[in-house]
Amino acid sequence: MSLAWALVESNPLNMLPAEHSERMMRSMRRRQLSPGERLELGKTAGGWWVVENGLMKMYQVAPDGSSLTYALLKPGDSFGETDILTGHWVRAMVEALEPSTVRYLPAEQFQSLLRESPDFALALLRVMAERIRQSQERVFHISRLPLTHRLAHALLGLAESVGKPHPLGTEIHLTQQELADYVGATREAVSRTLSGWSRQGCLETHRRSIILKDTRSLQTLCEQISMFA
């Protein structure tokens, strides 16, 4: 299983020639968001969004107030295409975790683009096929793996995809609640697990970040995941 769980590069523009993708990006509307600012999807027919810079999370809130993060979106990732293609507008929130910029294309323009550009349509199919594969992997992780294993897997994947260099190792700019929502667990359970790893010297926890220092124990847990398959 890859470490890119729920962090798939999800922009079909990345599969097109650079000149073509840059021209398309310039034709899209631009919007800047501050940390904590949200886009509410699904209230009306939406559009296609591409993250230009920053870091965002996509999540849904359950009736009991708990939430589950579907994906963390980094530069080059896109969202909204599934709703356009199915005509089923799923209610979800996309929140900026740091200053972020997104590009936006209305649904009707996105559909015209698919009809006019076979290369773009094929690239989109490849992206969506990869999302299905990773969604299957995510269901397996949340429903079958012990918290220690899926948390170790998530931390290593996050370090690889959105981690920032730090004098002590790699820093992941997420709170423990955000990490809990990402792995499908309670904040208390995640906090206990992180505290144990902190005492072992694997990591340090801070108010809005986690610093991975020695990942050997986490890598061992990830290697054991195949035993559960």
Image (cartoon, helix red, strand yellow):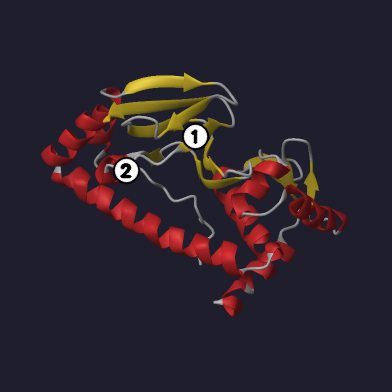
The secondary structure type at the circle numbered 2 is loop
Query: For the residue marked with disc 2, what is the amino acid?
Result: His
Callout in the foreground (2, 1)? 2
> Residue 21 sits in which quadrant?
top left
Q: Residue furthest front?
A: 63
Position of 114 relative to 185 (above/below): above
Q: Residue furthest bottom?
A: 227
The secondary structure type at the circle numbered 1 is strand
Question: Could you tell whether 15 is left or right of 178 in the image?
Answer: left
Image coordinates for residue 23, horizontal then vertical, percent: 24, 28
Q: Which residue is mark 1?
A: 94
Dot 2 crowding, Cα within 10 Å, few <14, some 14–19, many 20+: few
Q: Quadrant of the C terminus?
A: bottom right
Q: Residue at (25%, 30%) from the top-left corner?
A: 24
Question: Could you tell whether 109 is left or right of 148 in the image?
Answer: left
Dot 1 crowding, Cα within 10 Å, few <14, some 14–19, many 20+: many
Query: For the residue marked with disc 1, what is the amino acid?
Result: Val
Q: Nearer the viewer, residue 217 or 41?
A: 41
Q: Which residue is mark 2?
A: 88
Image coordinates for residue 207, horizontal then vertical, percent: 78, 36
Q: Work out whether mark 2 precedes mark 1 in sequence or the reverse, and give the earlier one.
A: 2
Q: Residue at (28%, 40%) from the top-left corner?
A: 84
Q: Residue at (29%, 28%) from the top-left corner?
A: 105
Residues at discs 2 and 1 in contact (Cβ within 8 Å): no
Instruction: Give the label on residue 61, or none.
Output: none
Q: Residue at (34%, 27%) from the top-left corner?
A: 104
Image coordinates for residue 100, horizontal then vertical, percent: 51, 26
Question: Could you tell whether 151 is left or right of 188 in the image?
Answer: left
